[in-house]
Image (cartoon, grey):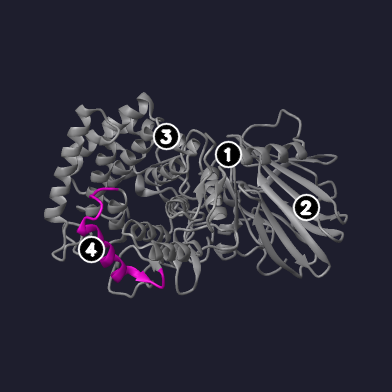
Amino acid sequence: MRPNEQPGGGDHAPHVLREYALLADGHRGALVGPDGNISWLCAPGWADPPVFSSLLGGSGDYLVTPANRRFVWGGHYEPGSLVWVSRWVTTSGIIECREALLFPGEQQRVSLLRQIRALDQDAVVRVRLDPRADFGREPVREVRRDGPLWWARSGGLHLRHSGGQPLRPNGAGPLCGELTVPAGGRHDLVLEVSAQPFDDEPPDPAESWRTTEHSWRTSVPPLTGGPAQRDAVFAYSVLRGLTRPGGGMVAAATTSLPERALAGRNYDYRYAWLRDQCLAGRAAGLIGRFDLLDDAVAFLAERVLADGDALAPAYTVDGGPIPQERELGFLPGYPGAAPRVGNWVGGQFQLDVFGEVLLLLATAGRHDRLGDVGRRALELTADVIRDRWGRPDSGIWELPARQWTHSKLMCVAGLRAAAGIAPARLAGRWVSLADTILADAAVHGLHPSGRWQRAYDDGRVDSALLFPGIRGALPQGDPRTEATRQAVLAELESDGYLYRFRPDRRPLGDAEGAFLLCGFAAALAAWQAGDVVAADRWFERNRAACGPAGLFTEEYDVQQRQLRANLPQAFVHALMLETAVTLGQAEPCRPPR
């Protein structure tokens, strides 16, 4: 056994985040590394323990890689989908592995499709399947073979694998060996992971691929024109893949990837943040694709009507409470962070979320997609703002409760948007409430220089203050909006990227990475101010902050040019999509009249 090899074959060190690709089907997501290893897959759902967890140092993984270890890696997504194609150029030929989760996915069963293709020469690949449930703690048991089929269990999960006839158990794992694919040929592998025993025939790989291709083709809207057309379509694909059909959208597919090495800021984002889903729903409405908008409205309206003023900032994707945060001391974790699950955000009050909910519901109303349930949620949300807007809250950045100016102004923006679709009896009341909140913010949250400040008791700037102007809290051309934009850029910009705020006296970048969400907000703010050149510059700079797969994380280390924190971050993809369309970098493909 090599010095760095764990029992069960988990000898794969983690890669830098830009080298991972995402597979997702709405119910869960997998990460594929450049070596062809599935290093992360939770099953059966987003926040369940992973069956492959080598990303965090667990033993479970699923490797398909060239037997010739001297290769150069690349890859791409097939257009308008989360079908990833790994590509290896070896010294003896070119090998590709086409990978996807069966789409649309089943709630209690994962189907992972892998298709090895020999492009020009016979291809020999190494395969190792070592599923380990519960972060690698559950070994494989109850193994049986029947020709090309392999069954087993791990923890409470049932496993079935097809297409691995030559594979046998050895010291590196329960199913290992080499496969040879003749030149021009292909070989299919299908792994199923289920919460229930299998009582059906194994899937036909060709039919599974046809279903997946067709479903992606009909789920992702065509966009036209502009240099960012492909990236905008891909951003929508990511959002679709992260959203449970009819339910919540996870903020990211992973947990515990550090924002800053050894800083203790590593979180579990496998849950549905309401603010994030509002951004995704609004972006979907902007391009005229209403499935994500409808999902967001249904999920948020249900939570608002159920919880009212006790609305949490985030839930599980099925609307349940998020479990309390706890560390997993038995795992080494991704370098620079201790692994943990759960999140303490469920107990916070974030006032700005109510403004975001109003903005989303108003978007649905303008498209005539609100319905009675949505309208009741709209009224209740406005009532909560009326009763609670004067209280301190934790704000967009989930900090200790204060009178955050951004939170007040986002409620102003939401109330004005809601008034635009409301009957007269409500519209006048909501506009009056918006005026009252704005007047209070002008007294307590306006800096002597004429720009908005972070909080009533904090005169510093904050990039979050760009959003109220973008969302219509103030009339177009209000001097406070432009003064705030200029101050934010002067204080928080570095090399074309934008930081949230200065947490202390250290230089920008020492405390945390640049926030890509804020960079795209800077593009929208510049466009609104009429500075098209600056808007395009901000957009292109932040659009480039990704790896070969095109996935964005929450933060970007400007100095090291590295992605930081959980992958992929949904709200960055949502705002990138909105920015691309707003700036004309991609245009919705409207159906003919």
Mark pair 1, 2: CA separation:
26 Å
Point 43% across, 66% down: residue: 537
Which residue has dot 4 on it? 483
Above/below status of 567 relative to 110: below
Question: Label 4 sits on what residue type?
Answer: Ala
In front here: 289 or 73?
289
Mark pair 3, 1: CA separation:
19 Å
Question: Label 3 sits on what residue type?
Answer: Phe
* Residue 271 visible (yes or no): yes
Q: Quadrant of residue 152?
A: top right
Mark pair 1, 4: CA separation:
41 Å
Left or right: residue 591 versus residue 263 is right
Which residue has dot 2 on it? 116
The percent position of residue 238, horizontal first and vertical second, equals: 54, 48
Residue 27: mark in rendering: none
Q: Quadrant of residue 554?
A: bottom left
- Other-residue count near label 2 (Cα within 10 Å), few / some / many at <14 / 14–19 / ≥20: many
* Residue 176 visible (yes or no): no
Pick whichever of labels 3 and 1 is earlier in the sequence.
1
Which residue has dot 3 on it? 299
